[in-house]
């Protein structure tokens, strides 16, 4: 399918360029080259959406999994440290409990 697509694109491109060159150079048969150029451009406009759709499907490959935000190293330190000694002091202690009262 990819070869057919490549061949169709190349043939249409050559047809457009040949018709344009013929219209510019061969003034004796300008009407023929003008009609050829018009038909090549119409063919391009009609087939372009189909060719684009086929080329985008033919070129799709599974994309690699992008790195998640958690796997990227952070430049700034975390707001809450994950040290073992800090775990007990993350939230304010309840002062009504006897083990949490400060001794003056």
Image (cartoon, helix red, strand yellow):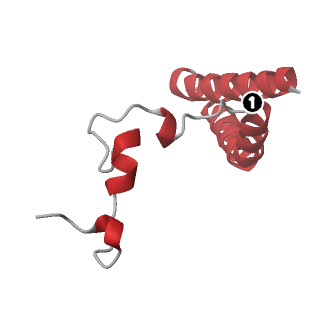
Residue at image location 17% in from the left, 63% down from the top: 103
Percent from the top left, x then y, of residue 13?
66, 26
Give 60 or 24, whichever is nearer the viewer.
Answer: 60
Query: Which picture quadrant has residue 76?
Result: top left
Residue at image location 74% in from the left, 30% down from the top: 61
Query: Which picture quadrant has residue 52?
Result: top right
- In the displayed structure, does residue 36 sit left or right of residue 30? right
Q: How many marks?
A: 1
For numbered disc 1, what is the local secondary structure?
Answer: loop
Residue at image location 62% in from the left, 38% down from the top: 34
Tell me if I can see residue 92 in this picture: no
Percent from the top left, x then y, of residue 46?
74, 49
The residue where tag 1 is placed is: 61
Give 93 or 5, whichever is nearer the viewer.
Answer: 93
Residue at image location 50% in from the left, 34% down from the top: 71
* Residue 27 to residue 42: above or below: above
Give 82 or 73, whichever is nearer the viewer.
Answer: 82
Tell me if I can see residue 32 in this picture: yes
- In the displayed structure, does residue 75 sit left or right of residue 16? left
Which image quarter is the C terminus in? Answer: bottom left
Which image quarter is the N terminus in? Answer: top right
Q: Residues within 10 Å of mark 1 (few under 14, many from 20)?
A: few
* Residue 54 to residue 15: above or below: below
Percent from the top left, x then y, of residue 23?
57, 29
Q: Residue furthest left?
A: 104
């Amino acid at each position: 399918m990819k070869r057919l697509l490549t061949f169709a694109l190349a043939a249409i491109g050559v047809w457009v360029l040949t018709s344009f060159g013929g219209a510019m150079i061969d003034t004796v048969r300008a009407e023929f080259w003008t009609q050829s150029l018009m038909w090549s451009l119409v063919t391009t406009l009609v087939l372009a959406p189909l060719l684009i759709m086929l080329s985008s499907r033919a070129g799709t490959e599974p994309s690699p999994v992008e790195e998640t935000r958690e796997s990227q190293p952070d430049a700034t330190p975390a707001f809450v440290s994950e040290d073992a000694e800090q775990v007990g002091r993350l939230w304010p202690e309840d002062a009504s409990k006897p083990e949490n009262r400060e001794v003056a």
